[in-house]
């Protein structure tokens, strides 16, 4: 944006960005409309980037934004967008088959002891916590508890196996320029539609942190974001690297 000569970049994210004269830095806060808040996706922003960002919708409710659009003569189609807009018919498996550069291979479904229980249709079609579509006859409900990509293997277990008390995050970023301590009490959120849970962060080095939850979290997934808050203030986040 700066290379193009623009002064600012405005986005439609529902999140608040403001400058604190007291702190002498930019703050990112949850949106006024908590049902539409999108701060979870913005944990990797830097103070330098925030200088050039405008996010005006964060101070409005979704209904207010739609009313402003109508008053301005702007038209919009569907009322809400809940799915991936570019996947026609919500057929995600077919979309992945068409756009993956490599063939999607079937493989083994095993239990934690590596006993073979069935065969999966391809790793991209499964996610941690999934129960339906496994094709396994078993007296106890089974869930995907791990995906071993380098072995093309899915591991299943019982529901309690999904609960994790801690994780290691990598590529950690803190939006605030200074932190008061290397151990911080926060609320940590493990996916976009999950509720944040009380947790303690211990900063291990410049890129990694240990996150310990007060209550175990269900279906924590490697590769997803874990995002840190103090009330409405977005502190930062990282990528879930490993689980405990």
Image (spheres, rainbow, N blue to C red):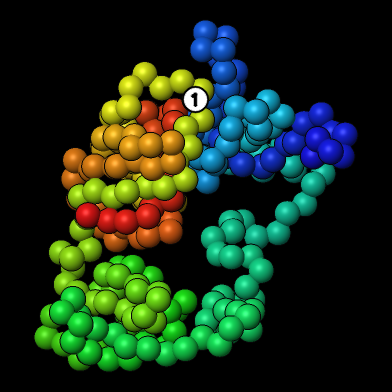
Query: Which residue occupies 68% across, 25% down?
Result: 51
Q: Position of residue 166 (x, y in %)?
A: 24, 48
Residue situated in front as seen by the camera: 60 or 68: 60
What is the quadrant of the N terminus in the image?
top right
Q: Is residue 150 visible?
A: yes
Query: Which residue occupies 36% across, 18% down?
Result: 180
What is the quadrant of the C terminus in the image?
bottom left
Question: For this view, does 201 lie left or right of residue 38?
Answer: left
Residue situated in front as seen by the camera: 88 or 222: 222
The picture quadrant where one finds residue 2 is top right
Query: Which residue occupies 42% across, 90% down?
Result: 106
Q: Position of residue 144 (x, y in %)?
A: 29, 73
Q: Farthest front residue?
A: 205
Question: Badge 1, how many Cα within 10 Å: few under 14, some, many 20+?
Answer: some
Q: Is residue 107 above or below residue 9?
A: below
Q: Is residue 145 above or below residue 94?
A: above
Query: Which residue occupies 66% across, 39% down?
Result: 65
Q: Position of residue 150 (x, y in %)?
A: 40, 76
Q: Farthest right residue?
A: 5
Q: Is residue 37 visible?
A: no
Question: For this view, does 36 lie left or right of residue 206?
Answer: right
- Which residue is denoted by mark 1 in the rendering? 176
* Badge 1 element: loop
């Amino acid at each position: 944006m700066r290379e193009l000569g623009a002064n600012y970049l405005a986005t439609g994210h529902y999140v608040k960005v403001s400058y604190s004269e007291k702190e002498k830095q930019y703050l990112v806060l949850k949106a006024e409309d908590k049902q539409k808040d999108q701060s979870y996706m913005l944990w990797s922003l830097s103070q330098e980037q925030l200088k050039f960002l405008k996010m005006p919708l964060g101070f409005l409710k979704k209904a207010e934004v739609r009313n402003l659009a109508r008053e301005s003569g702007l038209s919009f189609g569907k009322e809400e967008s809940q799915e991936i807009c570019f996947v026609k018919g919500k057929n995600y498996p077919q979309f992945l088959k068409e756009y993956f550069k490599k063939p999607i291979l079937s493989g083994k479904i095993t239990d934690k002891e590596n006993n073979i229980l069935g065969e999966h249709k391809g790793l991209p079609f499964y996610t941690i916590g999934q129960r339906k579509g496994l094709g396994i006859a078993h007296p106890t409900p089974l869930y995907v508890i791990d995906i071993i990509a380098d072995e093309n293997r899915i591991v299943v277990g019982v529901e309690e196996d999904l609960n994790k008390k801690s994780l290691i995050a990598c590529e950690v970023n803190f939006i605030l320029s200074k932190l008061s301590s290397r151990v911080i009490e926060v609320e940590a959120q493990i996916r976009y539609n999950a509720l944040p849970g009380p947790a303690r962060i211990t900063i291990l080095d410049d890129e990694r942190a240990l996150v310990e939850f007060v209550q175990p979290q269900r279906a924590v997934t490697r590769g997803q974001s874990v995002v840190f808050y103090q009330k409405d203030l977005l502190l930062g986040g990282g990528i879930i690297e490993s689980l405990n």
